[in-house]
Image (cartoon, grey):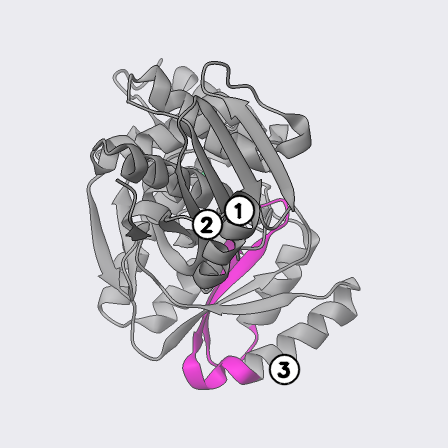
Amino acid sequence: MIVVPGLEEGFKGVFGAGSVTTVQAPGRVNLIGEHTDYNEGYVLPMAIDRGVTIAGRKRTDNKVVLHSIDYRQKCEFDLGSIHSDLSARWADYFKGVAFLLKKNGLPLGGCEAVLQGDLPQGAGLSSSAALEVASATFLQKLFRFDLGDLDLIRLCQQAENEFVGVKCGIMDQFASYMGKEGHALFLDCRSLEYRWAVLPKGLAVVVCDTGVERTLAGSAYNERRAQCEAAVGILAGKLPGIKALRDVSLCDFEKHQGLLDPVVLKRCRHILTENQRVLDMVEALGTGRLERVKVLMEESHVSLRDDYEVSCRELDVLAELGASTPGVFGSRMTGAGFGGCTVHLVRTEAVEGFQQKVGPAYEERTGRKATIHVFNASDGAKFLNGMDR
Ligand code: GLA
């Protein structure tokens, strides 16, 4: 992330000179394990070298004044009355975090801050989670409380669930806070046990943005979640004690799938097979079996396309182009879907060839331009500086 020096200057321009506290939180790309987090399953995301930076200081009153450099917009609210505002949606993520912190009795006061990001928004790279995690880290630093890592992560997720209204799982906030340079994060979304998985040397993580914007707040995401929960309710009739799709084995699923309507059956099949793919992928990456990695990522895409039905034509085209490009060890859509990005593991020396082939071929087939990024796995949220007393 490269926005920091400019940001502190930006702060001065908006609020005047003085010392500030600056924090940063990254976006993420998910390598595999899609829609498994809210089913208490496994995921394998990595934090990326793009994100959100916040610089600010305390005020003496109860007001929060935010200025988004990207939107060139100010948003002001009182901590005693925090409401969502349709004309400044970007501020809702900060407000949601402030709301939850207050609700949990943490000592917040007024503050003023500038915000800036270098993550494409609505592209499925977790600009929302990055903003939530940056907000929580900023407020924690400024008001000197210590939530503890897991509580901070959960609070950010809750802000999105309760304040923004998206029933997301915990993957994005977890990755944004706990990411580690050079590593992906293998997370069990039930126990929240995690371990960092080293990414094989010589492989670049290439992300192609379809240019089709997705809005996660759209009903389709919450609908998928409700379908999974409904399935658990039905299957529990035969499999007492199950709490989430995580608890259903493929063998039990095959035995009882006749109880489910055909759409819900497909949703479950995706979750169960995807969980297994995450475990297999961690193993294959660890042992350098890149051909296996390629198969797993491609199977994941097909499952998201046909069973979970969250892909779109543009994502399918990119996944297909990636799969047929030399030096590529895996191509799939990443994130919630309905637009956004694909992720590809590409041999470093093949990245240029990838760009030369995939960019023009995508444009020819869809009439859209893809933005192609090469991301590095990075550390999670960071405190950059602060002289606030
Ligand atoms: C979004 C949500 C995550 C996860 C993914 C799909 O990014 O925020 O919790 O469910 O979609 O894997």
Residue under pointer 1 = 304
Q: Quadrant of residue 171?
A: top left
Residue under pointer 3 = 356
Q: Is residue 336 magenta?
A: yes
- Dot in front, 3 or 2: 2
The image shows residue 35, relative to residue 301, as above or below, that is above
Q: Residues within 10 Å of mark 2 (few under 14, many from 20)?
A: few
Q: What is the CA distance from the residue labelled 1 to the residue labelled 3?
A: 27 Å
Q: Quadrant of the N terminus?
A: bottom left
Give residue 134's position: percent from left, percent from top: 39, 43
Residue under pointer 2 = 17
The image shows residue 241, relative to residue 97, as above or below, that is above
Q: Residues within 10 Å of mark 1 (few under 14, many from 20)?
A: many
Between 91 and 196, the one lying in front of the other is 91
Q: Which residues are the magenta region?
A: 324-352
Instruction: Name the residue: 56% across, 79% down.
Output: 354
Instruction: Name the residue: 57% across, 74% down.
Output: 324
